Image: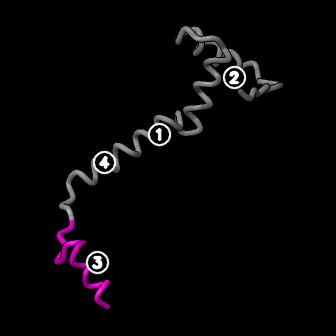
Amino acid sequence: MPSLQIRDVPDPLHRLLQRRATRNKRSLSQQALVDLEELAGGDPRQRRQEALERIAQHWRGVEPLQWQQTPEDLIRVDRER
């Protein structure tokens, strides 16, 4: 897994991250990862799952298409050409 090192973190920001980490019972690194992930839009797997759920929800309310001809009839017509 790739790693990231951040240098010269301002003291107020470091203290803020440390307080958040302590409050959430995480290490400073874990808290920084959680915050970065949230800032970047969240967990990609969760975003993908939410998108799939929205798509499924959309299609649940849509009536299926009603074709005038069956696929077999379309194939038959195509073969007769």
Identify the residue at image location x=75%, y=18%: 11
- Residue 11 lies, with reference to residue 37, above or below; the image says above
Residue occupying image coordinates x 62% and y 17% = 30
Tag of residue 47: 1
Q: Which residues are magenta?
A: 65-81
The residue to which callout 3 is attached is: 75
Quarter of the N terminus within the rendering = top right
Q: Which residue is mark 4?
A: 56
Cα separation, mark 2 vs mark 4, equals 41 Å
| x and y, in percent, of residue 20 in the image | 58, 15
Badge 2: residue crowd in 10 Å (few <14, some 14–19, many ≥20): few
Q: Position of residue 41 (x, y in %)?
A: 54, 39
Q: Is residue 72 magenta?
A: yes
Q: Secondary structure at mark 2?
A: helix
- Please tell me which of labels 1 and 4 falls first in the chain: 1
* Residue toward you, 33 or 44: 44
Relative depth, front residue between 78 and 63: 78
Please, which residue is most extreme toward the bottom here?
Answer: 81
Task: Please tell me whether mark 1 or mark 4 is closer to you in this view.
Answer: 4
Query: Position of 17 compared to 81: left or right?
Result: right
Between discs 3 and 1, the one toward the N terminus: 1
Distance between the Cα atoms at labels 2 and 1? 28 Å
The amino acid on which the numbered mark 2 sits, given as a three-letter code, is Leu
Residue position marked by numbered label 2 in the rendering: 13
Q: Are marks 2 and 1 in contact (CB under 8 Å)?
A: no
Earlier sequence position, callout 2 versus callout 4: 2
Label 4, label 3: how many angstroms apart (C-alpha)?
Answer: 31 Å
Nearer the observer: mark 2 or 4; the answer is: 4
Q: Farthest residue toward the front?
A: 80
Q: Quadrant of the C terminus?
A: bottom left
